[in-house]
Image (cartoon, rainbow, N blue to C red):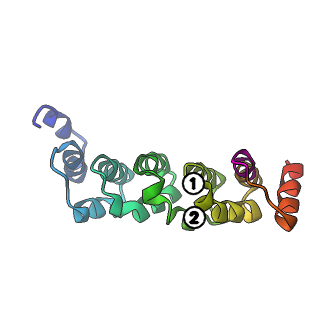
Amino acid sequence: PGRHTDMLRLTGISEKTMVARSILMSLRKPGESEILKLLGDTNPDIKRTAIIAAGKFSINELREDIIKALHSPETESVAFHVLKLFGPKVYGGVIGTAFKPSNSERENLMIVRLLSSMPLSGAVPYLNKLVASGQVHVRLRAAEYLCEQGFNPEGTQRQKILEIINET
């Protein structure tokens, strides 16, 4: 446990950052409240460290907070990888709520990638929503995934997917 403590005390590193890193390096599972406190910090480095700690210690209860981190350019990549680590059983019920047409294209593409890890039956409603109102590349990727999985749309759904494919 004390092997890397010298890294915590480098000059220029704030006390909060040292605390966050010590939690990450600890063998003891931190409390959910400790990680939540770090997630609420304004420093992106501390937030990233908190997200990584939530993944390392499998603190699945923080999945909604980690999904919110997808909306920040400073934390989106770390949040995506931790959600992938958690797996669709943990984030599946709530990932669809992260989609908003106002999200950046990159955010919504990450959401499509997370949805593509889920069983098709659970992902279809969210993917249909992305097909209907996402950015062009997001709609195309969602439609491609649905087709790859053998989803057979009917009626207006089929027409909408064909329109999207023809747009690009």
Residue sitting nearer the eye, 96 or 70: 96
Circle 2 SS class: helix
Q: Position of residue 105 (x, y in %)?
A: 66, 53
Q: Is residue 159 left or right of residue 56?
A: right
Q: Which residues are magenta?
A: 143-150
The circle on residue 119 is 1
Say whether disc 2 or disc 1 marks the residue closer to the N-terminus: 2
User: Which residue occupies 83% across, 63% down?
Assistant: 154
Instruction: Return the residue nearer the eye: 24 or 164.
Output: 164
Q: Amino acid at mark 2?
A: Gly
The answer to whether residue 164 is left or right of residue 70 is: right
Q: Relative to residue 80, is residue 41 depicted above or below? A: below
By secondary structure, the bulk of the magenta-drawn segment is best described as helix
Residue 146: x and y, percent? 71, 52
Report the disc number at residue 96: 2
Query: Amino acid type of disc 1?
Result: Pro
